[in-house]
Image (cartoon, coloured by chain):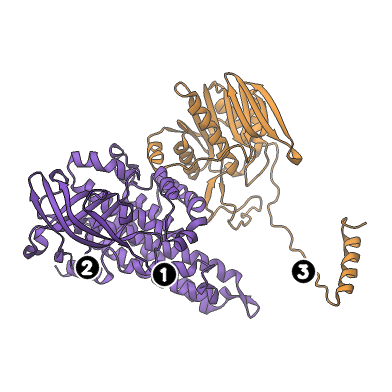
Amino acid sequence: MNFELSQDHKVLQSAVRDFVEKEIKPIAMKIDEEHMIPDELVAKMSEMGLMGSYFPQEYEGAGLDMLSYSIVVEEVSKACASSGVLISAHTSLANNPIYAFGTEEQKKKWLPDLNTGRKIGCFLLTEPGAGSDAGGTATMYRREGDEFVINGSKIFITNGGYLGTGVLFASFDRSLKHKGISAFIVDLKSPGVTIVKNENKMGIRGSYTTAFAFDDLRVPAENLLGKEGKGFNIAMDTLNGGRIGIASQALGIAEGAFERALAYSKERKQFDQAISEFQAIQFKLADMYARIETSKLMIHKAAWMKDNKMNYAMESAMCKMLASEAATYVTKEAMQIFGGYGFICDYEIERMYRDAKITEIYEGTNEVQRVVISKMLLA
Amino acid sequence: MKLLVCIKQVPDLESRFKPNAEGVWYNETDLAWRMNEYDEYAVEQAVQLREKLGEGTELTVLSIGPDRVVEAVKKALAMGADNAVHIQDPAAAGKDPWQIASIIAAYAKDKGFDIIFTGMQSQDRGSAQVGVTVAEQLGFSCTTTIVGFECDGGNITAKRELEGGIKSVVKMKTPALVTCQLGLNVPRYPTLPNIMKAKKKEITAIPVADLLKDEALATTASFHPPAKKGGGIVLEGDTGVLVDQLIAILKDKTAVLR
């Protein structure tokens, strides 16, 4: 057994780290304040190959593995969680289902643009009445000749505002619940697609969270992803992988806050000594670091299992749950270590504190993760 | 054209350095490693030339050290070098610049390299001797601390930066060696697709014993942090008194006021 990253993974890690240090870290605060990731940064991340890390080179991906992808999202999120989730939602929730369930023609048509960031991907599952209960999908579709016609609405769509390529879920018969759901690849610049709004949020403010309305959106029959009625399975399989991405984002947020808190605790003096000399602070640092390392181990295990084509549903649920709870815990403790300064926006801790919370909620709430884990234990 | 770029892996300079047990170098435990900064400029310049010359040009990257240095080699391959040579030497850190240069020269002497690129110095040892010594041993023309580089056939024009910001231009014929300085270029990031491609590039491993025949000419006798200085002087009292005290100290202890 070996817990070290391979040399190839270390090369990747330091390359991404250098990129993040120079290109993302200096503008992370601005991204949060302006609720916008600059197009130039998206272009640079695409150029760097961050948008299709683990898909084969024949589809213009980088051809690396799931662990590499996890490292990418982690390193980016250390500096900017908004940029981290842009990559995660794009890669795990759009590229991945097309790669895993698409026909060869579909892969050739859609993946090169996604893997190179020419199009930004999103995953259109959540609706006002269908959150954790995706079987409640009320967006409807019907077949008309060579087309499917889609009507309904979607909310909380990460990356929706880019109007790139979406994987959209709709039902042909609501009474069938999850068995009535199918998945479609959608060009979101098509007629019939309206952005209702881009939400204003507590955290990950640079990331788009979009509400859509679909009014007779016409999708060519060839854009059906997988078989009709199998959309729910595609969604669940997709989310298994997505959880590794979100766990990596949460891990990055936690590490970013920890690094700053550790450094600050050594600099800040009270009662004539660095506050890191106080056991109250030392114990906080120990608890924070232990949670970070536990999360990282579980993420690496889940990624390793996916790379080795093993069933990783339980591990992905566990890593998402552990890492997101580490992120909210670590950012909270980091703010306590920073004291009043942590509450002030000039320091980055308050942003990380706000960014962390969503990781406990999206891509399956942590309550849903516990359902997944316990169901598998008791099956 | 055949190009060689020599790189060294050095500790991250933000590391906390402690002397090793013998007290002649730093303890390598728990250090993070990366490519020597000046060598990154060398790699970038070599890759730019490689790209300009296109087919028929081969760029080899070379590094001496234990297995960990392969990480730096892989980075250079991901930046665009064609192949690599890892001279395996777990004890490289204990060798003097003459020995390191001798190893490189022994490897390079019958390979027909036209241009060799190195950093102007390493960030850890900082001797700035290896590049020039390699050039001397191979009989190459050589110039150091370049901030500009052009190559037209067998003619090299290198721009150097001298003290006070003065520039000079040096012209040389190949075969030649240049040592690269900050300001020469902005090293590219290895992109993910290129990191993947680099995995398929050949890294030839050569045991150092096959190349090293020379004895060291210099040995490091001691490696230690500077002696702790005494505490500063705190002046107290009215401004007028403070100024008088300060002037007296500056006159007495420094060359600022005479």
Q: Residues within 10 Å of mark 2 (few under 14, many from 20)?
A: few
Q: CA distance from mark 3 to mark 1?
A: 43 Å
Q: Is residue A184 visible in this depiction of the protein? A: yes
- Type of amino acid under label 3: Gly
Q: Residue at x 87, y 58 (%)?
A: B254
Q: Residue at x 44, y 38 (%)?
A: B78
Question: Could you say where residue B62 lies in the image, as x and y percent from the top left?
Answer: 52, 34
Question: Could you say where residue A8 lies in the image, as x and y percent from the top left?
Answer: 41, 45
User: Is label 2 or label 1 in front?
Assistant: 2
| Secondary-structure class at tag 2 | loop
Earlier-in-chain disc, 2 versus 1: 2
Q: Residue at x 88, y 62 (%)?
A: B250
| Secondary-structure class at tag 3 | loop
Q: Residue at x 62, y 44 (%)?
A: B94
Question: Could you say where residue B22 lies in the image, as x and y percent from the top left?
Answer: 64, 52
A55 shown above or below A260: above
- Type of amino acid under label 2: Pro
Q: B110 left or right of A36?
A: right
A109 shown above or below A138: above
Query: Dot 1 corresponds to which residue?
Result: A354
In the image, which lettered chain appears purple? A
Quadrant location, the C terminus of chain A? bottom left
Q: B214 left or right of A153?
A: right
Quadrant location, the N terminus of chain A? bottom left
Query: Dot 3 corresponds to which residue?
Result: B231
- Which chain is indicated by disc 2? A
Q: Quadrant of residue A211?
A: bottom left
**Chain B colour in the picture:** orange
Query: Dot 2 corresponds to which residue?
Result: A128
- Which chain is indicated by disc 1? A
